[in-house]
Image: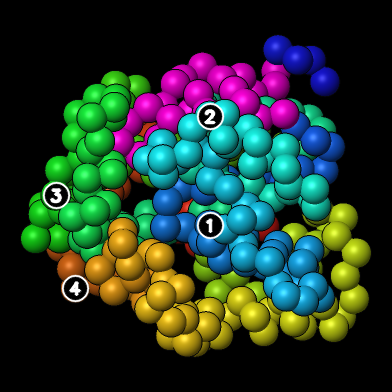
Amino acid sequence: MDAAKLPQVTRTYQNHHLDSTRWDVYQPRKGDIIVTTSYKSGTTWTQQILHSMLHGDEAPLPKMRELSPWVDARFMGISKEQLAETLEGLTSRRFIKSHLPLDGLPYYPEILYIIVARDTRDVFMSLLNHYSSYTDIAMMALNSPDRPGDPIPPCPEDPRELWQNWITRGWFEWESEGWPMWSNLHHTQTYWDYRHLPNFLFLHYNDMLADLEGAVRRIAEFASIDVDDASVERAVEETTFANVRKKVEETSEDEDMSKLFFEGGQRRFFFKGSNERWRGVLNDDDLALYEEAKERVLSPDCAAWLESGGAVA
């Protein structure tokens, strides 16, 4: 394939959460898997599936956060040098998290990309729960003195105030939605434009809810993970929302480090996992803003897939 027609990095994403230049220290290995999503779209869920299939028969089970780093996270207090050491030190097959659009994420033909997406309105409701639960410690970490650009403001109390800014304003000058985080619609469109690439797998949150076993098998086939029926059944059982929630509820206070960043800790992070909670929150005027954003940012086929899911041709 003509290299000129392959994805290229054309943007730098640096703000209170992100630093895309941290990918400079990444050295690809054939077979690496990058789980790349907009926020609140099934990132952790997909990581958990890979964790189960790649490590589920190990005892003790290694912690997922130690195996699947979020490379573009700026605020975790890990230097680029430390990140490089962490990535190099992963001796098993690597599956790595990113929230970057494709115009900010390096593309390598020899690695695999799993793109997970969700209906925009459902993303918003999950974001609202996530953002509104940030603790003072989280806000201090995000708004540290070395933060590039403006600080992230506190989450407004009125959900519709957040929605109206989020769906009409961009944090970066090339975006027109996603404030005060970064793009949601633009994220998916950048990958959709290259959906023909053989090392891209698109998953939709709705499809994962409706047929988790099918999603597990698709991931295994795409990533050439040799699993038998028992391994698939284990991955499905371990990653249903009810069982993930149960594990969270059994986590001791001492083990739950997420409580430093979220009021309620993991119990708040894994909140409901359901869709269409936006009904009764967003009114007709709010939804009209959504329709305008779709027309502004998305191609019609990408917009239809984001709302309904299904196979990506």
Kindly tell me whether residue 179 is visible in this rendering: no
Mark 2–mark 4 CB contact (< 8 Å): no
**Place of residue 302 in the rendered image (x, y in percent of width and height, measured from the top left):** 52, 44
Q: Quadrant of the N terminus?
A: top right
> What label sits on residue 172 in the rendered view?
none
Element at label 2:
helix
| In the image, residue 113 above or below residue 65 | above
Which one is in front in this view, the residue at disc 2 or the one at disc 4?
2
Element at label 4:
loop
Whether residue 274 sits left or right of residue 103 in the image: it is left
C-alpha span from label 1 to label 4: 26 Å
| The magenta segment | 5-27
Dot 2 corresponds to which residue?
80
C-alpha span from label 2 to label 1: 22 Å
Task: Give the mark nearest the N terminus, 3 or 1.
Answer: 1
- Of residues 114 and 77, the one nearer the viewer is 77
Residue neighbourhood size for the residue with mark 3, other residues' Cα within 10 Å, grouped as few (<14), some (14–19), many (≥20): few
**Amino acid bearing label 2:** Lys
Whether residue 33 sits left or right of residue 150 in the image: it is right
Dot 4 corresponds to which residue?
280
Task: Give the mark nearest the N terminus, 3 or 2.
Answer: 2
Dot 3 corresponds to which residue?
154
Element at label 3:
loop
- Of residues 93 and 207, the one nearer the viewer is 93
Picture residue at 19% right of the left edge, 73% below the top = 280
Kindly tell me whether residue 230 is visible in this rendering: yes
C-alpha span from label 3 to label 2: 28 Å
Residue neighbourhood size for the residue with mark 1, other residues' Cα within 10 Å, grouped as few (<14), some (14–19), many (≥20): many
Picture residue at 72% right of the left edge, 43% below the top = 89
Which one is in front in this view, the residue at disc 2 or the one at disc 1?
2
Which one is in front in this view, the residue at disc 4 or the one at disc 3?
3
Dot 1 corresponds to which residue?
43
